[in-house]
Image (cartoon, rainbow, N blue to C red):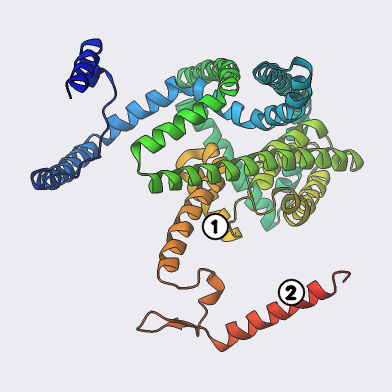
Amino acid sequence: MEEEKRKNKDKAEETPEGYYSNRPTLGNQSPSRFRRELGKCMTYLVVVAAGIVFYFALLRLTDISGIFAKAVDVLKPFLYGSLIAFLLNPIVKQMDAILIPMLEKQTKNREKAEKLSRTAGIGLAIVILGAVIAGLFNMLIPELYQSIRSLVFTLPRQINELMDGLNEIVKTDSNIGVMVRTFVEQATDTFQNWLRNNFFRQANDIMTLLTTGVIDFVGEIVNALIGIIVSIYILYSKEMFGKQGKKLTYALFNSRHANIVLHVTQKANEIFGGFLVGKIIDSAIIGVLCFLGLTVLNMPYILLVSVIVGVTNVIPFFGPYIGAIPSAILIILDDPMKGLYFLIFILVLQQLDGNFIGPKILGSSTGLSSFWVIFAILLGGGMFGFVGMLLGVPTFAVVYYIIQMLINGRLHSKNLPEATEFYDEFSFVDDTGKYVISKETLEKKQRQAEEEKDGDENPEN
């Protein structure tokens, strides 16, 4: 006994503040009744305080949105960097899968092989990104300059031809001539009044808007360049960020809820990655097909129109039509009949993409029906513009998956079927909570089982 006391005394003298310097273990003892009651009171207090804060937040919603917009504006380089890193990550992962085993055999050092592979992968990804951007600018800027130059020289001639045609119609005494004459006079008066009363007064405002637009555009370019640098650091440290995120999740939630959060995060990564990468590949194919088709049809502004159609095709469903409208206007100004042919070609190309190319590349990456895709695009576009139209579908797909997971969990706890097809018109759940299948659903399931059985017995068919 004396020896044990002496050892404890020596240990205490060696680490007199050991109890405070070492991390304490929390949650081992059950809370007392006082602490339980105190916890309930604190819960009520937090709920009331949250309600008060929410009320005052609604009163200051404009100021809060302004602060949020300012924060987003300041963090744009990091947002751009995160997006660029997300898009380049598949290239880096593929390079790691190829190079790490080879370099490990050469260096006999796993860590060194990983560093060399990561450096090579990021370098290749940045080179590919730079080549794509340079290629787009190299194709787009000369074609845009040529298109604007052509419009400057051809538009006055086309307007003169239109006015000559209208004058010929006006000279006639028919009802159409009278209507056209009245329309031209009213349009001319309206245009002159607009020039006198509005245009010259708003010239300063227009110049200010143009100057601000140029400054904002340059600022976005600078943010994107900084974002590329940020993406390099993100790609270098992505494993560390993942570990930190997992550590924080397990620290904030209990194990069950933390695993749910991590599962949803992984699923969101799969949905966004599959959708964005697939859409980029799909849009590149559509742009190439558009270029080939317009070349065969001998259309004007081939390269410019192909880039517009390819870029806007990133937006699901409405993208091809959004790109077709300005492209059709450009072609119609050059040749109205070719503009009509172009619209027919775009309709055919959209059907080809929607029924064959898109499903082959994207597959069921979002798990949404056509109705929910249109809903997500309209909702995202109405709230966040172009970015909302682009990211609305994968974002809504994640929300849809979470809701589906919660609903299926509730059904599973009640021993009810989770598939939607079981809840037809005649199926029901009785008062005891037992699911009763309808005759139609039962027969359908039996037919499917027989077809699957026949397919397994005759695999050659």
Foreground pick, 11 / 349: 11
In what quadrant of the picture does the C terminus appear?
Answer: bottom right
User: Residue shown at 21%/19% (left/top)?
Assistant: 3
Dot 2 falls on a residue whose secondary structure is: helix
Quarter residue 175 falls in: bottom right
Give the image location of residue 148, x and y in percent. Answer: 73, 24
Q: Which residue is mark 2?
A: 452
Give the image location of residue 211, x and y in percent. Answer: 52, 16
User: Residue shown at 77%/42% (left/top)?
Assistant: 286
Under mark 1, the amino acid is: Trp
Tell me which numbered mark, 1 or 2, is placed earlier along the sequence.
Answer: 1
Dot 1 falls on a residue whose secondary structure is: helix
Asked if residue 139 is positioned above or below residue 348 in the image, the reply reads: above
Q: Is residue 316 left or right of residue 379?
A: right
Can you tell which of label 1 and label 2 is closer to the viewer? 2
Under mark 2, the amino acid is: Glu
Give the image location of residue 52, x and y in percent. Answer: 16, 41
User: Residue shown at 74%/39% (left/top)?
Assistant: 281
Disc number for residue 321: none
Q: Residues within 10 Å of mark 2 (few under 14, many from 20)?
A: few
Disc number for residue 372: 1
Give the spatial CA distance, label 1 vs label 2.
30 Å
Q: Residues within 10 Å of mark 1 (few under 14, many from 20)?
A: some
Question: How many numbered markers are drawn?
Answer: 2
Asked if residue 223 is positioned above or below residue 387 in the image, the reply reads: above
